[in-house]
Image: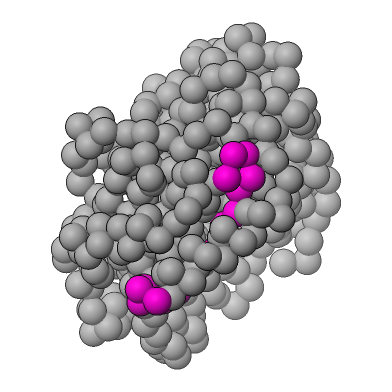
Amino acid sequence: MIGKKEAKKIVNIALKHTKADQTEVVIFNQTQALTRFANNYIHQNVNESNSTISIRVVFGKKIGSASTNSLAPKKIKETVKWAEEIAKFQHENRDFISFPCVKKKEYRDIKTFVKKTAQFSNIERANAVAEIVDIAKKYSLTSFGSVSNGLAEICISNSLGTFAYAICDDVFCNIVMSGENSTGYVQSGIRDVDDMNFKSLAKIAADKALMSANPITITPGQYTTIFEPLAASEFLEFFGDFAFNGKLFEEGRSYLTGKLGSKIVDERITIVDDPYKKTGFAFPFDFEGLPKKKLVLVDKGIAKNLVYDSLTASKAKKKSTGHALLAPNPFGPIPLHLTMKGGSKSIEKMISETDKGILVTRFHYTNVIDPRKLTFTGMTRDGTFLIEKGKIKRGIKNLRFTENIIGCFNRLDDISKKSILVASEPGYGSRFGSGIIVPSIKVRNFAFTGATDF
């Protein structure tokens, strides 16, 4: 990490050598490490550090961007020139008005960094894996998964005086427990590594694998279905990305086109984009340097607001809501801090009140097949169970589904009282902790369209 003072120096180098009307500089430094295990053994341990500086310049309404992973002054100057050269050959972007001008006092001081998480070492990750493997061996299971931690340093500045800086970190763990003909899964991500209990996570995955042993086949059809938070988060993620995206809305490609201000889902559903919630991945600003704000998207079933970055906001003649992603971003703004309000019952109570139904741990390979109608498809995985007369009877083989998210949100039986943070898997891109806080949900007549052999 280079620190706030050094980041300011780098920004000044770029701004000093630009001839553009406006210039934006984004510095993204990251360090991340991962320990991966399979067949109850660690088989990979990797560490990565990288720095990126991205520069956007504007001449009138022509925008050019370029980036480099070198922070050397010579390379920064070259990148500025490349961005300026690219801008010359661009068509004018009529929606562009200006980069944001933000004063220092407008940013909230929030905790995004836990030193112990950033310093979580190779040995400590190996010890965490040892706890997981011990649980697997205790129950004659085979474990697979990973433990990773990372640190990101983000600085966003522009020629209008905006200067935003923050350091954030996170730890993530995912575990598959495999039996002879069954699997169980769990994942967790959080800022503070002290709040992650690897042994307890392993026990959850092990219990699911044991409970789903010798799964039976059931006939595809419509079933009352309870979705644990990991599965429920995918409903919410697609809903947020496609329905509340200001760009898609203005282009007439959002489900909410013509419906904003109307009741669209069950009145028990309230969804808020809350970047300051302590149990989530709080973060103070977006990738244009605008301060983030709490925004109600759905209030008791009524669609209330959309999310915008500066380009989509200017086109809609509105103000940015602080939802810009790293430019260039052709998809548009999305909410990164979704929270769904819980209900009044425990998931155990929801199960006990189900005469016949299905319990789903998570989905696999889900895709939106109709973004405007919000229809998606995929399959269950790593813990799908049959519920009969209020009890989990046994595991069932995985099922394929095609469903409509809005339809499901209007066929709600219940929402669990407890909401938990479902962290997004880090993947192979830049390290930036994000996630959705979501309860379990119970849906009537969920349409399973096909069966599998496993």
Coloring scheme used: one colour
- Tell which of 108 and 371 is nearer to you: 108
x and y, in percent, of residue 136 in the image: 40, 77
Is 310 located above or below residue 118 in the figure? above
Report the span colored magenta: 59-74
x and y, in percent, of residue 324 in the image: 50, 41
Q: Residue at x 38, y 45 (%)?
A: 159
Q: Residue at x 47, y 44 (%)?
A: 22
Q: Residue at x 27, y 51 (%)?
A: 165
Q: Is residue 226 visible?
A: no
Quadrant in the picture for residue 84: bottom right
x and y, in percent, of residue 253 in the image: 76, 30
Which quadrant, please, contains the C terminus? bottom right
In the image, residue 436 lies in the stretch drawn in magenta: no
x and y, in percent, of residue 122 in the image: 27, 83
Judged left or right of residue 128, residue 88 is: right
Is 237 located above or below residue 207 in the figure? above
Is 318 located above or below residue 333 in the figure? above
Which quadrant, please, contains the N terminus? bottom left
Quadrant in the picture for residue 245: top right
